[in-house]
Image (cartoon, rainbow, N blue to C red):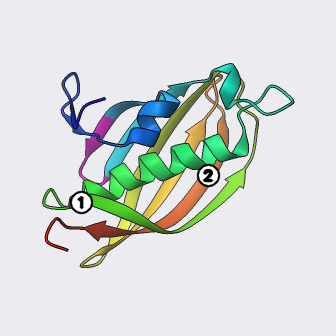
Amino acid sequence: MSEKDNSSGIDFNIPFAEHLGVIAHRQKNGEAEISLQLKPEHLNSWGAAHGGVILGVFDIVMGLSAKSIDVEASGAITIELKTNFLQTVTDAINARARATRSGRTLIFVEGEIFNEDGHLAAKASGTFKLKYARE
């Protein structure tokens, strides 16, 4: 994906997300949504999404959410990320995040991942620091 995904207008320049195959759907006013169609290389030995893939998706969607708080920010750096795994995901990951509180540069975000059946598969909370080009 390019720095601006032409179909959505989302500021999305994350090589790791592109490598995974993440699709960004929404990023506005402290909220973001992305999805990932799972491939064999995303799976663990039991045929479900690897925990590292789940964490990576959370990091991406929650960072996009945090960054959308300030259009002048060039990015959001993960300070802390806590995840609870609730169910497996075997086909597609649908993730959303929303900023719950913000200070001058620290943003607190909650995220959810749903499996292909629409069931809540994982929850996360994290703290992100906004990065500016001048820094």
* Most common secondary structure along the magenta stretch: strand
User: How many numbered discs sit on the rendered protein?
Assistant: 2
The question of residue 51 being in magenta is answered with no
Q: Position of residue 53 (x, y in %)?
A: 63, 41
Between residues 53 and 61, which one lies in front from this camera angle? 53
Q: Is residue 106 left or right of residue 96?
A: left
Q: Check disc 2 and report the residue beneath it.
A: 123
Residue drawn at x 13%, y 71% is 134
Density class for disc 2 (Cα within 10 Å; few <14, some 14-19, many ≥20) is: many
Q: Amino acid at mark 2?
A: Lys
Q: Is residue 81 above or below residue 60?
A: below
Q: Position of residue 90 (x, y in %)?
A: 72, 24
Residue under label 1? 69
Assign the N terminus to one quadrant of the image: top left
Real-space Cα distance between discs 2 and 1? 21 Å
Q: Label 1's element? A: loop
Give the left or right position of residue 134, taking residue 61 as reference: left
For image coordinates 16% across by 65% down, the residue present is 133
Seen in the image, is 48 located left or right of residue 32?
Answer: right
Q: Residue at x 72, y 38 (%)?
A: 50
Q: Which residues are magenta?
A: 26-30
Q: Earlier in the sequence, mark 2 or mark 1?
A: 1
Q: Is residue 6 above or below residue 103?
A: above
Residue 47 position in % (x across, y down): 80, 25
Which of the two residues, 73 or 126, is positioned nearer the viewer here?
73
| Residue 40, picture quadrant | top right
In this rendering, is residue 126 above or below 57? below
Label 1: few (<14), some (14–19) or many (≥20) C-alpha neighbours in 10 Å: many
Mark 2 residue element? strand
Q: Measured from the top left, where is residue 30 in percent x and y?
A: 30, 54
Residue kind at label 1, given as amino acid type: Ile
